[in-house]
Image (spheres, rainbow, N blue to C red):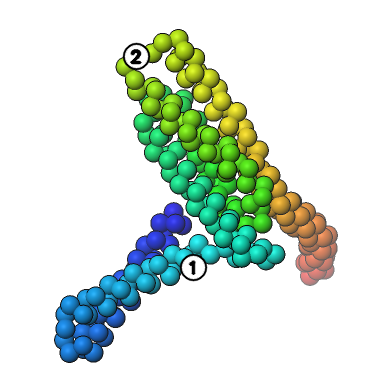
Amino acid sequence: MKRLFMTLWRWFVSWNVGFVTAIIAFFLFDYQFFLSFVSGTAAMLATSVYMKRKARRIVANGLLKEEKDYIRTQLAEAWKKWKRMRRARLKVRSLVMWQKISHISATVEKMIRAVEQHPQKFRIAQSFFIHELDSAVTMIEKYVYLIHQPVRNAEMKEVLRKTEQLLDELIAAAEKRLLEILSDDVFDLQVETKLLEQSLEQQKPLESSEWRKERDYETVR
């Protein structure tokens, strides 16, 4: 949802920049429609490209420029594999397999977004993005291709069954890696929860004391 909003916003801004540029160019070039159209289109495309690159920029302290570029490239590849997985899911006939692939794709999406927000954690997900995710996409696409074939022998049935079992193991591996990425966030939440609990506990005696004072005051009256 956030990506859709950012895309719509980028289109809105770039289109308005292009429109304003075209109007200015129309008067600057002595009412030349073609030149104003070209100028507006160029400004629109340049604005869109700039905003898109800025949105993908990785901001992280302690990382070199080369590391940021590498992480950005790997995340872009991970998004491509994720999209291939989503497309393959639409061709699956089995509801069980559809649910398994949906679960994997949802977990992978959360992993990519988590690394985008915290690039320092890329090292945790690096192995999964490069090896497990690549193998998973290839395996799912091969599975979808084979289940649409009109004939099956014992060997094909066995490899399809094994693929379905491996998807369960892949789900477990993806969830484990996601939990490792989120471990710091879980710890931070635990700390904040404990601090809030302590604060609330400290407020209880004060509120009780104030309530007793008000009750005594009403009794005296």
| Residue 151: image tag | 2
Q: Residue at x 16, y 86 (%)?
A: 31
Which quadrant of the view contains residue 129? top right
Task: Give the quarter of the figure containing the N terminus.
Answer: bottom left
Residue 153 in which image quadrant? top left
| Crowdedness near tag 2: few (<14), some (14–19) or many (≥20) residues, C-alpha within 10 Å | few
Closest to the observer, 190 or 212: 190
User: 156 or 113: which is nearer to us?
Assistant: 156
Name the secondary structure under disc 2: loop
Residue 37, placed above or below residue 208: below
Name of the residue lying farthest toward the top: 154
The residue at 44%/64% (across/down) is 52
Report x, y in % for residue 214: 78, 66
* Residue 208 location, quadrant: bottom right
- The reply to whether residue 124 is in sight is yes
N-terminal of the pair, mark 1 or mark 2, is 1
Residue, disc 1: 54
In the image, what residue occupies the spot 66% across and 53% down?
A: 121
Q: Secondary structure at mark 1?
A: helix
Left or right: 172 as drawn, with respect to 75: right
Rounded to the nearest angstrom, the CA distance separating label 1 from label 2 is 50 Å
- Residue type pointed to by label 1: Lys
Split into 4 quadrants, where in the image is the C terminus?
A: bottom right
